Image: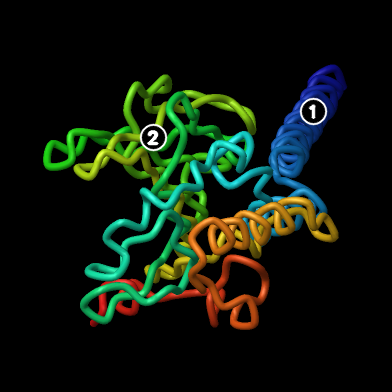
Amino acid sequence: MKRGHHQETGSLHLALLLGVVVLAVIGIVGWRVMSAEDKQPTTQQTTGKSEQSTAPEADVVLQNFGLASLASVDITTQALREYESKGLKGFYAFGESLSGGRLNPNFEFASLKAGAKVVAAIDGVIGFVKEQPESKDYEVFLQPKENSKWTIGYDHLVNVTVAQGATVKAGDVLGEPATQNNGLIRFEIQVNKDENGKTTHICPATLIESGDSTLLNELAKMMSDWETETGLELYNADAQKPAGCMNQTTLTPEQAEGR
């Protein structure tokens, strides 16, 4: 009688023990599943990251054309003393024909006043500063952010005030324009857009604030002042849409190089 009771009690204890073990296993498995689910990003989070990585980068908006004011341009007949023989001018618009079948891919200010300052056209970061031994000056690249498809190139600078990686605001001084072999002071501003391994030169006048015609009016007046001062027809206003963009608003590197 006592033996049978012990057997029943032992069986009961074993059953209870097995039940506890089973419940513990179920609890551990459930906890791990819930933890794994918590670590997974929600559909909204995943979608947000995907949309952020694939969102197109906005176009840059220029606040100036590399000069705090176009009053820095030195409008003088001295700049055209080789106009008849070499076609040299004090300002070259985007898309103008150059020697060798080339087309001008930038705004070239080839006659500036002493003391003129070259300034940032946008808020951004300095991509790099490159010394050019052949011309004894520097080239500065400015981007709205690192690895941007947009690059604003400033060519022929001296007394550079920025270094690679520096952040700047529109209007901050980058340096001064360099003196050419002919004694005139100049620099070039070029806007490039790189997409899918392809570079396109963009006319700077197409990238100003929408609806703000102030810069375009100043640019058109500057070219008109050149013609008034020299008595020459240097710029075909009818071919510029908008002002400063001669016949076209974009160029390929091949067009710029005459290839």
Residue 118 spot, x, y in % from top left: 49, 33
Residue at the spot 66% in from the left edge and 76% down from the top edge: 241
Q: Is residue 155 left or right of residue 36?
A: left
Q: Can see residue 238?
A: yes
Seen as rendered, the residue at the extreme front is 231
Q: Which of marks 2 and 1 is in front?
A: 2
- The correct choice, above or below, for 1 with respect to 193 in the image is above
Q: Is residue 187 left or right of residue 150?
A: left
- The colour scheme is rainbow
Residue 239 spot, x, y in % from top left: 59, 82
Any mark on residue 20, and which? Answer: 1
Task: Name the residue tied to disc 2.
Answer: 177
Within the image, what quadrant is residue 53 found in? bottom right
| Front position in the image: 158 or 192 | 158
**SS at circle 1:** helix
> What's the distance in space between the residues labelled 2 and 1, CA to CA?
84 Å
